[in-house]
Image (cartoon, rainbow, N blue to C red):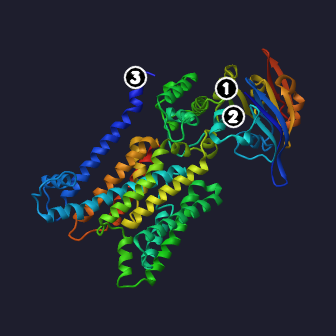
Amino acid sequence: MTKKEFKIHFNHPKVIVFLFFLLFLFVFFMSFFVGRYPIKPSQLILVLLSKIFPIQPTWSPTVESIILNVRFPRIMSSALIGAALSISGLSYQGMFKNPMVSPDVLGTSAGAGFGASLGILLGFSYLSISLVSFTFGLIAVILVTFISSKLLNQKTLALILGGIMISSLFTSATSFVKLVADTDNTLPAITYWLMGSLASVRKTDVYFLLIATVIGLIPLVLLRWKLNLLTLDEDEAMSLGINTTLLRKIVILCATLMTSAAICVGGHIGWIGLVIPHFTRMVVGCDYRISLPVSILMGSTFLMLVDTISRSLLTSEIPIGILTSFIGAPFFLYLMIREAKKV
Amino acid sequence: MSLVVKNLSFGYSDNKVIEDISFDINKGDFICVLGKNGVGKSTLFKLLLGFLKKQAGEILIDNKSLDTFSRKELAREIAYIPQYSTSAFNYSVFDTVLMGTTCRLEPLASPKAKEKQIAYEALKKFDIAHLSHKYSDSISGGERQLVVLARAIAQGSKILILDEPTANLDYGNQFRVMQTISQLKTQGYSIILSTHNPEQAMWFSDKVMFLDDKKILAYGATQDIITADLLKQIYGIDIDLVEKDGRKLCFPRIQK
């Protein structure tokens, strides 16, 4: 192989990853400046650096508090949720050999949402709520997988049909939770949280999200090459030396963990898990070695951007879940029409 | 390298799909498996590839039972070329072939320069290196089968199992792909291939195996086994075998 061929094939994607990383950094820092209380770039740099180096504060405590306790948790959590949902979608799609599935379509979101609202209703602690949410998210995926395995003649459709059914089941269950919830405290909490909002995130949320996302992400990153083989026909993947059963279990656990963690903190934020993986593949192709890092960067950049818009567009905040649907649904339609035209 | 099958049986409950099959394959053998639809060709292949667990008998690879192989170890011995390779996603030809090297990698590793070189050599072997950067939806069916063959070569396994590899190809590509496959036997590969076309067997294979009603009906050197009578018995049509330039052709009679 000549040097040039090598370059075209293998160095090109790294440049793309780097460009998306720059975009991520840009949006990350710009998001600090948006908001009712103005912050100067110098203040931001000094406050962030003061966490690492001992710098005499020349800024007011209000500025520090807004940067560290208000904007930092929001920006970080939106970035983490965006990344978690995108990676979940990307992994589910490969594992189910179906580009049309996502945490929403598979019912994971609805299951995790039900688990979390049940946890809120029962007055569980933070950690217990997330565990219940994870468990129900997992139950939803396993049920959908089981249902689709019974409809072998309709492979693509089976997952989607199963997902619609299970989603509706868990959504109804959530409605029931809301019905019996205390109308003064619990009901508003569940309702507002379900809409998808990052208005009340705290630093603990960021730590929780960070840990859950890293735990879910590490196995997927390590197995990124094998995820490619999982998209092949079952027999082919096995003949190439892949333990498909084990690999599939790992992917389900990791993706569901990330999805439910994202849902516990941000509520139901739809469409990202479907749109970002599609967009990623359109830009860099299917290879998980590249699409994995790119979709992390794209997903987090996208949600940071949407969250910044949601808290600054109107005087009162728009729940982020509503905005991602408004942006995600038409964009997905556009992608679908574009793909249909190619054939 | 040797593959030995002894008294192999498989079936769902009392309904046997394969019963008491024995044969063996050595280095450089090219065996064609023929038989009507549903006589168990695919089941036999699935057993050899470990997709299905046998109920009785033995499958030995180099005197080691197939059951003792992990997926990865088995992939180093046997490669599989399906009728039609499918992926829900669109990979480049190069990446597709690179997937073949997975069974040679450490559990969590991605292909490195060495594996990329192996994939490139495999592509060159079939003269399709120029397709490297193309995507699987923009190449022809014949090219796609060559890509899957290259992937099997990159896998490094010496036994190739091909399940009707030409079933989806046009006439020209059927012949080209078969010719390419038959060249592999001189390079130390053992080939087991199923087909519905007796001419392919007569032109390219050394041995044929006819399956009928769960069992081996006939097995041996191709020129001894394939006769007009046997083809008539299997396929239920009147056939003459015509010879031209040392090759036999099937000549089914048209019913008046």
Element on which disc 2 rests? strand
Q: Few, some or many C-alpha atoms within 10 Å of disc 2 (few <14, some 14-19, many ≥20)?
A: many
User: Can you tell which quarter of the image residue A305 is in?
Assistant: bottom left
Along the horizontal axis of the image, is A284 left or right of B32?
A: left
Q: Is residue A239 above or below residue A166?
A: above
Q: Which mark is residue A3?
A: 3
Q: Earlier in the sequence, mark 2 or mark 1?
A: 2
The residue drawn where x is 80% and y is 26% is B207
Cβ atoms at labels 2 and 1 below 8 Å apart: yes
Q: Which residue is mark 2?
A: B162
Q: Is residue A332 above or below residue A241?
A: below
Element on which disc 1 rests? helix
Q: Residue furthest left?
A: A58
**Residue type highlighted by circle 1:** Ile
Q: What's the chain of the residue with tag 1?
A: B
Q: Which mark is residue B181?
A: 1
Report the mark closest to the observer, 3 or 1: 3
Q: What's the chain of the residue with tag 3?
A: A
Along the horizontal axis of the image, is A200 left or right of B238?
A: left
Seen from the viewer's position, the closer of residues A340 and A239 is: A239
Q: Residue furthest top?
A: B245
Q: Position of residue A245 (x, y in %)?
A: 61, 51
- Count of numbered circles on the image: 3
**Residue type highlighted by circle 2:** Leu
Q: Position of residue A6 (x, y in %)?
A: 42, 27
Q: Which mark is residue A140?
A: none
**Residue type highlighted by circle 3:** Lys
Report the mark closest to the observer, 3 or 2: 3
The residue drawn where x is 55% and y is 42% is A229
